[in-house]
Image: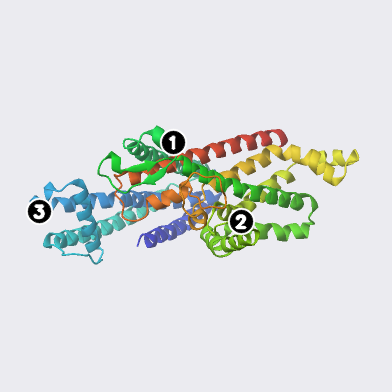
Amino acid sequence: MNLVLIATVLIVMAVAYQVGLSRSRAVADGGVRLHSRPGYYGVLVALWCGLPALLLFGVWLLLQDAIVEVLVVQQLPAELAALSEREMQVLMRRVSALASGQGLSGEVQAYEVAAAQQMARLESMGRLAMIAAMAVLAVVGLVTAQRRVSPQLRARNQVERVITALLALSSGVAILTTVGIVLSLVGEALHFFRYISPAEFFFGTVWNPRFSTSGAGQQGEFGLLPLLWGTLMVSAIALLVAIPLGLMTAIYMAEYAPPWLRNVAKPVIEVLAGIPTIVYGFFALIVIGPFLSGLGDMLGIGIRATSALTAGLVMGIMIIPFVSSLSDDIITQVPKSLRDGALGLGATRSEMIRQVVLPAALPGIVGAFLLAASRAIGETMIVVLAAGNNPVLHANPFEAISTITVTIVNQLTGDMDFSSPQSLVAFALGLTLFVITLGLNIIALVVVRKYRQQYE
């Protein structure tokens, strides 16, 4: 229904554009010079027609559920007013499910049926009122805008102001989303630290959360160090695979490969970045893990099929395109004059690459490495399937390990009580991971900015 409304508004805006275009051309045909081109008048009329309706639609989406819920709660029997907030939320979810035609488990009370009918009726009435209001706004906007088309109307200026406002709004949404994520993580993490002290969490060496909330002694141990060490171990193995292979691939593509091979090979390599990580996880679990285990048996080394080595190798393969693509772009941006100067002084191609191109591109390449590291640290599905989920502090890459992302998945899987430390710890882990990746990204951006200032 919502998609149909949006599509209808867009069609009406297209019609309004044609109306404004025709109106401006008719004015111009009378021998009057317009301030702006006819297309700007068409866009302005379309914006006057569509934007108020779309704004109303957005406000309706934000407020309808809350308003309907308040009206439905007012119609409930008086004895239900004593329900707690959580019980009322459960009741309203049941009423909403009944109103949408879904089945419910357990006995359905008469007041639930009546509330569901009231909710469905209010939602239908609100939808019809919203459609009527949108239609009125669109018609009024169309009539008003096409009448305002005149030689004195600065249509281009107004259109550009609207576009600037939309761009600023888009940026604001991205920024506010980030702020909202951070605040939600910080709020829940602070709630977790009411149960477990920060010193115990950040410096603890044992991870053993017991799923019980009956007293502090039954909550378990929440030491971060085994998970942090597992994350760093898997990421280090991945970078040991991705950095040499990715950098050598980038050097070959930028300096040695003929154009036809570069045009074919580079997109093929970058396809690796588009493969879903769950596919890499299955590949690690079914192919790489058994292969490493068999290889270990041949060499007399105990290598588990699910281990830090398995997850790290496959994750390294996954992030090769990040390293190779970014490094290739940076190497190709090194000024040709540096290459020509080195070759003119008698350097071979390999000497020129080693002593001139790579030092010149080093800041950008380091930034690419840091971005790849942040990608590896935040990976989830590969380590969920291939790392083995063993939150023990050890330095053997051939054994199973657990990471921060795996633990977040485990702590939030199933029917959990989000007021218990066993669930709230996922937010503390997420905040820790966010700070680590944010720090790496900031360092990478600073390094890349230094490179751009020097060579652009």
As shown in the figure, which amino acid type bears the numbered disc 2?
Answer: Ile
Per the model, the C-alpha gap separating discs 1 and 3 is: 50 Å
Q: Please tell me whether residue 20 is drawn above or below residue 426 in the rendered image.
A: below
Q: Residue at x 42, y 52 (%)?
A: 409
Relative side of 427 to 384, left or right: left
Q: In the rendered structure, are the residues bearing label 2 and label 3 in contact, judged by CB atoms less than 8 Å apart?
A: no
Mark 3, residue position: 77
Q: Residue 83 vs residue 253: left or right?
A: left
Viewport quadrant of the N terminus:
bottom left
| Amino acid type for the residue under numbered disc 1 | Phe
Q: Secondary structure at mark 1?
A: helix
Can residue 434 be seen here? The reply is: yes
**Residue drawn at (43%, 49%) of the image:** 407
Residue 202 badge:
1
Horizontal and vertical percent for residue 231?
52, 45
**Residue placed under numbered mark 2 in the picture:** 301
Any part of residue 165 in sight: no
Residue at screen point 75% across, 41% down: 358
